[in-house]
Image (cartoon, rainbow, N blue to C red):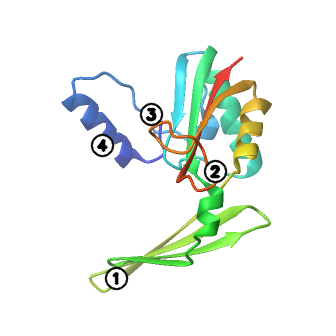
Amino acid sequence: VDLNPRLLRTARRRFTERKLHGTFLVKDLRSLDFDGEFDAAYNWFGSFGYFSDADNLEVFRRYSHALRRGGRLLVDQVNRERILRNFKSRVQIGNLTTRYRWDATRQRVEGTWTCQDRGRQKTSRSSIRIYTPGQMVHLFEKVGFSVENVYGDARSGSFRRSSDRLIVIGRKL
């Protein structure tokens, strides 16, 4: 499930190349309507936190509803403390300039992405709520998950204040 059809086309192509079966849906996470159909759900590489706190909690509720009892949920996000300790307000990569601002009140990183290409300029914006480990664990527990593990990288490394990622795995009670 993704809101971006281009990303789903890429996923579908990769599945086809590997002779795997999959169903790909263009859908907003806040409107997931599955009922105990899955053993696991993965929200990978910073795809969580783009909505209001209430809507982010609703996404967790919908994940819980989609999973069978005992199903696992994995949520991956950047490590907030590492981001804030090494905060860069401007990043330039080729013709892409990104300006960031930390909104401490809302606990969000606000970004403005500007791309210069052949004399044209395209600007887009992003806003992501970055949770502390304790806040993330609270979200899991609030919707009926017990947290099994908290990792700091995709290789099951222990979470530390300096970790790149915050990866939380919970089991639906």
Distance from Cα at disc 4 to Cα at disc 3:
13 Å
* 2 sits left or right of 16 in the view: right
Q: Which mark is residue 138?
A: none
Mark before the other along the chain sequence, 1 or 3 = 3
Q: Compare marks 4 and 1 and give the one earlier in the sequence.
A: 4
Residue 3 vs residue 99, the one in the foreground: 99
Quarter location, residue 159: top right
Residue at the far left in the pictured view: 17
User: In front here: 7 or 145?
Assistant: 145
Going by the numbered disc 2, the residue's amino acid type is: Gly
Task: Single out the mark in the foreground, 2 or 1.
Answer: 2
Label 3 element class: loop
Q: Amino acid at mark 3?
A: Leu
Q: Which mark is residue 25?
A: 3
Sequence-first tag of 4 and 3: 4
Camera-side residue of 30 and 99: 99
Q: CA distance from mark 4 to mark 1?
A: 27 Å
Q: Name the mark nearer the viewer: 4 or 1.
A: 4
Q: Is residue 167 left or right of residue 172?
A: left
Q: CA distance from mark 2 to mark 1?
A: 30 Å
Please state if 112 lies on the left or on the right of 80 as rendered: left
On the image, numbered disc 4 is attached to which residue?
Answer: 10
Q: Position of residue 18 (x, y in %)?
A: 22, 28
Q: Could you tell me the amino acid type at mark 1?
A: Arg
Secondary structure beneath label 2: loop
Work out whether residue 129 can be spotted: no
| Label 1 environment density (alpha carbons within 10 Å; few <14, some 14–19, many ≥20) | few
Q: Are marks 2 and 4 in contact (CB under 8 Å)?
A: no
